[in-house]
């Protein structure tokens, strides 16, 4: 029989993984109450392991799909899960916050979506992994980002069923921002996520975008289509503004921190006129800390108001 991991040890492992790897997400975790922070770290560590399997380019797609299936089976089986600290913490988090298995199944499915491209209609001209329309891209974004949001709001706590659709759309905003930031890296892996019909309507193509190199001047059609993706992301960020009042008060500072960091990332991309090819666009650490300080101030003020009642 597999030896069970102590629950506190399990959460400590997840905290370590999140602190090391989560980057933007970790800044928002800090603004949460401890029990919710631990739960977020557990979900992140679970997702991170699935992502690492999916992204391991030293192995072929079939091997990675098999390893993801094995990881999924370990999580499902209480006996094998008891021996892995991440799975111990995840299962405890599920119980505490009533997170359905279906959402974690979808989360794993999202990490595997890029591994399905070879056998799907996503392979376009020039051997690039593409999406035909935004409807197709939205489905992809749902599985790789919106599902994370639907898990998170169960940890945050929410007061209305409307929060679920708003969390889904906030995830779309985040993923569209990631797509803009990662155009160069994705193209190097044979992936162009900007929809083909929008590229064509702007007078360019997936192949053209994939051929841009560091130092190249973007053409106006290329800037135009990337600006269109940015405008769409901005529209979905409005859902985050409507989501915030529906989230439990003790979790609003954390969500606000995350939204501000991602919005700042999008603004930085726009300020560079979508030149994401010369260097990776980021939110500097000092800006993240400034945003976090605002979130922490709100959290402390909220707790002081609560203790004064």
Image (spheres, rainbow, N blue to C red):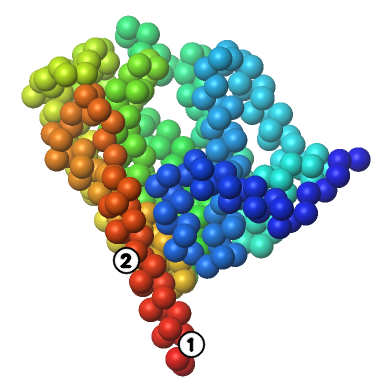
Q: Secondary structure at mark 1?
A: helix
- The residue nearer to you, when weighing 78 against 201, is 78
Q: How many marks?
A: 2
- Tell me where residue 267 appears, x and y as whole percent: 20, 45
Q: Which residue is mark 2?
A: 294
- Tell me where residue 43 appears, x and y as whole percent: 58, 48
User: Which residue appears farthest toward the front when viewing the image?
Assistant: 286
Q: Secondary structure at mark 2?
A: helix
Quadrant of residue 256 within the rendered picture: bottom left
Quadrant of residue 305 within the rendered picture: bottom left
Vertical placement of 48 versus 18: above or below? above
Residue 75, label in figure: none
- The residue nearer to you, when weighing 218 against 154, is 218
- The residue nearer to you, when weighing 168 against 23, is 23
Quadrant of residue 60 within the rendered picture: top right
Residue 137 falls left or right of residue 143: left
Residue 194 falls left or right of residue 164: left
What residue lies at 59% left-to-right and 34% top-to-bottom? 50
- Tell me where residue 75 appears, x and y as whole percent: 71, 41
What residue lies at 64% left-to-right and 17% top-to-bottom? 63
- The residue nearer to you, when weighing 132 against 128, is 128
Q: Which residue is mark 1?
A: 307
Residue 242 visible in the displayed image: no
What residue lies at 18% left-to-right and 28% top-to-bottom? 275
Identify the image quadrant of the N terminus. Answer: top right
Residue 270 falls left or right of residue 245: left
Residue 229 visible in the displayed image: yes
Q: Residues within 10 Å of mark 2 (few under 14, many from 20)?
A: some
């Amino acid at each position: 029989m597999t030896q069970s991991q102590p629950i506190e040890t399990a959460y400590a492992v997840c905290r370590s993984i999140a602190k090391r790897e989560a980057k933007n997400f970790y800044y928002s975790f800090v603004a949460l109450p401890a029990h919710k922070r631990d739960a977020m770290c557990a979900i992140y560590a679970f997702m991170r392991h699935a992502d690492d399997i999916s992204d391991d380019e030293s192995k072929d797609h079939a091997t990675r799909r098999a390893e993801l299936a094995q990881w999924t089976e370990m999580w499902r089986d209480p006996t094998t899960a008891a021996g892995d600290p991440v799975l111990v913490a995840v299962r405890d988090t599920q119980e505490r916050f009533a997170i359905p298995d279906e959402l974690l199944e979808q989360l794993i499915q999202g990490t595997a979506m890029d591994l399905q491209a070879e056998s799907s209609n996503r392979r376009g001209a020039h051997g690039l992994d593409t999406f035909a329309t935004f409807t197709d891209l939205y489905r992809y974004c749902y599985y790789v980002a919106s599902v994370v949001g639907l898990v998170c709001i169960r940890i945050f706590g929410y007061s209305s069923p409307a929060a679920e659709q708003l969390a889904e759309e906030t995830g779309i905003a985040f993923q569209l921002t990631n797509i803009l930031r990662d155009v160069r890296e994705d193209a190097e892996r044979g992936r162009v996520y900007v929809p083909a019909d929008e590229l064509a309507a702007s007078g360019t193509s997936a192949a053209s975008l994939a051929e841009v190199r560091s130092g190249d001047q973007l053409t106006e059609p290329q800037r135009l289509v990337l600006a269109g993706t940015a405008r769409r992301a901005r529209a979905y960020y409005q859902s985050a503004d409507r989501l915030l009042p529906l989230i439990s008060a003790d979790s609003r500072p954390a969500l606000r921190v995350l939204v501000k960091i991602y919005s700042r990332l999008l603004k930085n991309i726009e300020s560079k006129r979508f030149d994401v090819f010369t260097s990776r666009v980021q939110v500097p650490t000092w800006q993240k800390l400034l945003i976090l300080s605002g979130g922490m101030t709100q959290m402390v003020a909220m707790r002081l108001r609560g203790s004064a009642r």
